[in-house]
Image (tube, rainbow, N blue to C red):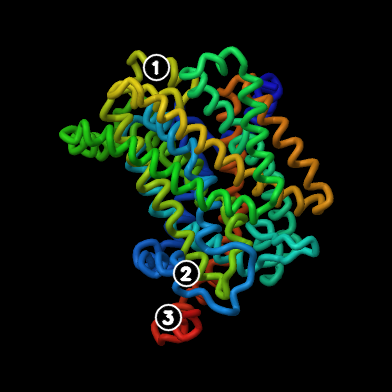
Amino acid sequence: MGDFFSGINSFLETFLFFDILFGTVKDVNLPFLVVWLIIGGIYLTFLTKFINIRAFKHSLDIVRGKYSTLDDIGQISPFGALTTALSATVGLGNIAGVALAVGVGGPGATFWMIIAGFLGMSLKFTEVTLSIQYREFLKDGTIMGGAMEYLSKGLAKKGYAQFGKVLAVLFAVLMIGGAIGGGNIFQVSQAYSAISHEVVFFEKNPLIFGFAIASLTGAVIIGGITRISAFTERLVPIMVIIYIGASLWILGSFYHKIDDAFILIFKEAFSTSAVYGGIIGSLVQGFQRAVFSSEAGIGSSPVAHAPVKTKYPVRQGFVALYEPFVDTVVICTMTALVIIITGVYEPDGIYAPLIAAKEGAALTSAAYGTVIEWFPSILSVSIFLFAFSTMISWSYYGERAWVYLFGSKFSIVYKIMFLSLSVIATVVSTGIMVDFSFMLMLAMALPNILGLFILGGDVKKQLEEYLRKLKSGELDKEAIR
């Protein structure tokens, strides 16, 4: 399997198009897809007049159920949709991805992760709003939403039906690949890497670990989005509390170094003499890892929001603003601070082999372990929960893309394949899988953001009309008391 991924990577690297899209930090290239994400985030931030700043309170009111109405249609609550999406985004990208970003791009990558999270809030707002607007209620009782729907239907309304269909199919293919790679194989391999350091039994029996996590995942996803939502509503708060609590413990122990860490982050973000290309190197690493963590702009989490009970599409867009904020601005920053303060990111340090092998989870575990010996055990629990929750949501994302391409009756084929690869991932080399996963997930942004550019004006109109009703008190009258 490792040779298979290596072969694909070598094949793609022979094409100039691949080099233009993905580039390399070593050669100080700025990949086109990173630029594409930055441009999309800036454009939508200005188009929505900085909705990522001015909508926090109203978003919280929606999550609390203050604006629920009798006309809401869907399968899950706004909070359930948010936790389902967060279960995919709050994952090993926050642990392994951040460690690799700092290890490869230096402390300055943290600054660009925060900026990416800020811009990602606007991207997430727009894509989730469109997902609700163009969702489809299928005959089997499930709901189809996400970029596949708004690319095909939305662009058709603009007179680009054939072009929209091509983009939708391309996106669906890429999301299936992203679900198998980043949402499954990468999660399992990183979780196994961290846990096998703590549990000798699994180190000697990797397949048993694979069967265990595949069985647990299968038990949840077999029930569809309603069971996934019910499970994540309970799991996500617990795993976030555990991880944030552990991070605060570390930061509290080194509170006197936090100021210096932030100074280093800002300084390195604009340094022209950094090891891997200075500003470009840290920017690329920061944005790539932030996107892999929050998924803003790649069009995956709108699938989780599509079944939400709501009357106004833009309303769930407000809820989605919290995803990049919680995932990237809060959790990723805390992880980065721990990595920087403990010094495990040093390119010439004793942990350099972990960076070279792209074992980000093990690197973060080492950082926590430098403070208190038993912390890696707690982190191992967090890593397992993060990987497990991400697999649950991404299995659903990939399954929706599979259904879009092949129909509902073949969804069981996808689920069997997904769970089988969870087992295989425990015995496959991780390096090429990381690159392959990032490639597929970043590539999803190409058709997705193109659709957001074309349809962004429609979202702006919905937003203005919604805010008018909110200001006039009309939405308060509709709400269930």
Q: Residue at label 1?
A: 352
Q: Secondary structure at mark 2?
A: loop
Residue type at numbered disc 1 = Ala
Q: Nearer the viewer, mark 1 or mark 3?
A: 3
Q: Is residue 476 above or below residue 155?
A: below
Given the image, on which type of amino acid does mark 3 rest?
Leu
- Circles 1 and 2 in contact, beta carbons < 8 Å: no
Judge by depth and name the residue closer to the eye, 276 or 396.
396
Q: Measured along the vertical axis of the image, is residue 28 above or below residue 218?
A: above
Residue drawn at (65%, 22%) of the image: 6
Residue at 45% in and 34% down: 382
Query: Quadrant of the rendered structure where residue 15 is?
Result: top right
- In which quarter of the view is residue 95 placed? top left
Query: In the image, residue 180 lies at what x, y percent?
Result: 66, 37
Could you tell me which residue is drawn at 31 percent across and 32 percent down? 338
Question: In the rendering, which numbered label is found on residue 470?
Answer: 3
Q: Nearer the viewer, mark 3 or mark 2?
A: 2
Q: Quadrant of the N terminus?
A: top right
Decide: is 394 above or below 233.
Answer: above
Q: Position of residue 194 (x, y in %)?
A: 48, 23
The earlier-in-sequence mark between 1 and 2 is 2
The mark nearer the N terminus, 1 or 3, is 1
Query: What numbered label is drawn on residue 65?
Result: 2
Whole-angstrom CA distance, mark 1 to mark 2, is 48 Å
Give me the disc on residue 21.
none
Residue count near mark 1 (Cα–Cα under 10 Å), binned few <14, some 14–19, many ≥20:
some
Marks 1 and 2: which is nearer the front? 2
Q: CA separation, marks 1 and 3?
A: 53 Å
Q: Is residue 133 left or right of residue 249?
A: right
Mark 3 or 2, nearer chain start: 2
